[in-house]
Image: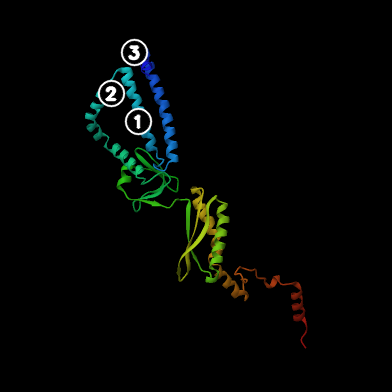
Amino acid sequence: MPNLLDIFDKFIHADWFNTMLGVVIICAITFVVARITVAFMRRVLNKTSLLPSSSIFINLVRIVVWVIGICCVLSMCFNVNISAMITGLGVVGIAVSLGFQDTLSNLIGGLTVSVSRTVEPGDNIRMGPSGVTGVVQDVTWRYTSIKDSSGTITNIPNSLMTSTAVCKLSPLNEISIPLVVTTNSERLTATAHHIEDAAEKAVARVSKLKKRPSVSFSSISDYGFKGSLSFTIAEASKASSATDAAIRAVAPYVHNHLIEEAMGDLTGQKLTDATGSLVPVQSEEAAPSGINADTETQSEKPQG
């Protein structure tokens, strides 16, 4: 290895053309190493749970590789004393840091929220009591990108992420719909099953389900049994459509006994069978023709 370095050193110092060629070779090697390192870093971040898959770590690795490559160019091609240069930069660093104070604070803030896992890509957050709400797209070395329900992306400086209260909300694909069921207590379990089946069929037409709908009750009020219908879909972008479909599907089962009582008062007949399920009621127009004929015959008979 030292022999190869000596040969390369003699080659690049032969004339100015060889020097420029050496710069191109070192930059090309640096470029390849940076690409391989970044690809490896992305794979590690996607598979490990130690760090979030934020691009700030990838950008830092890319910067480190290029800094090393530039130092090699200066040292090998132009005979620059890297140690002395680093010492000089250390002295000037205070003045430089004052000029890039905001940039450094955003960089440190991004590292802080990423390493501490305060926020990471995919989190549904709200900034402050009435701030920006949306899903975190990425944490870069300057900004944290948040996408709201309308598709608008807002870039928030990382320094604000460390100085503002951040509230983590439930993921958008986890949907919970409040319910107040006003059925009879004996039919509460059967009604819950009907609601779950109806919601599952309706939501499946909108998006693939990761967790089937389930109904759970939390309290009893003067208006009925309070609870919620919860399910998880695969595509968060279809949360609004899935919620609408589920509400439309379960609406007939939430207050079904009110419909039964109203129709029962009109017809004077019981609208549920022994299992508590709705049964069709025949009107007078749908009665057998023989009965109608007899009735008409009897009504047409002369009295006396």
Where is mark 1, residue-wise?
64
The earlier-in-sequence mark between 1 and 2 is 1
Are circles 2 and 3 on residues that touch, CB within 8 Å? no
Describe residue 251's horizontal placement relative to residue 9 as left or right.
right
Total numbered labels: 3
Q: Which residue is mark 2?
A: 82
**Res 210 label:** none
Residue 29 lies, with reference to residue 115, above or below; the image says above
Q: What kind of element bears circle 2?
A: helix
Q: Earlier in the sequence, mark 2 or mark 3?
A: 3
Helix, strand or loop at disc 3? loop
| Mark 2 closeness class: few <14, some 14–19, many ≥20 residues within 10 Å | few
Q: Amino acid at mark 1?
A: Val
Quadrant placement of the C terminus: bottom right
Asked whether 286 or 64 is in front, the reply is 64
Task: Tell me if 203 is positioned left or right of 12 in this view.
Answer: right
Q: Crowding near pointer 1: few (<14 within 10 Å), some, many (20+)?
A: few
Residue holding disc 3: 13
Asked whether, in this view, residue 266 is left or right of residue 137, the answer is right
Q: Could you tell me how far apart the alpha carbons at marks 2 and 3 are, in whole angstroms? A: 18 Å
Q: Quadrant of residue 110?
A: top left
Q: In the image, residue 243 lies at what x, y percent? A: 51, 55
In x, y percent, where is residue 256? 56, 67
> In the image, what residue occupies the spot 33% across and 17% down?
77
Q: Earlier in the sequence, mark 1 or mark 3?
A: 3
Give above or below for 283 relative to 242. below
Residue 293 rendering spot, x and y as whole percentages: 76, 75
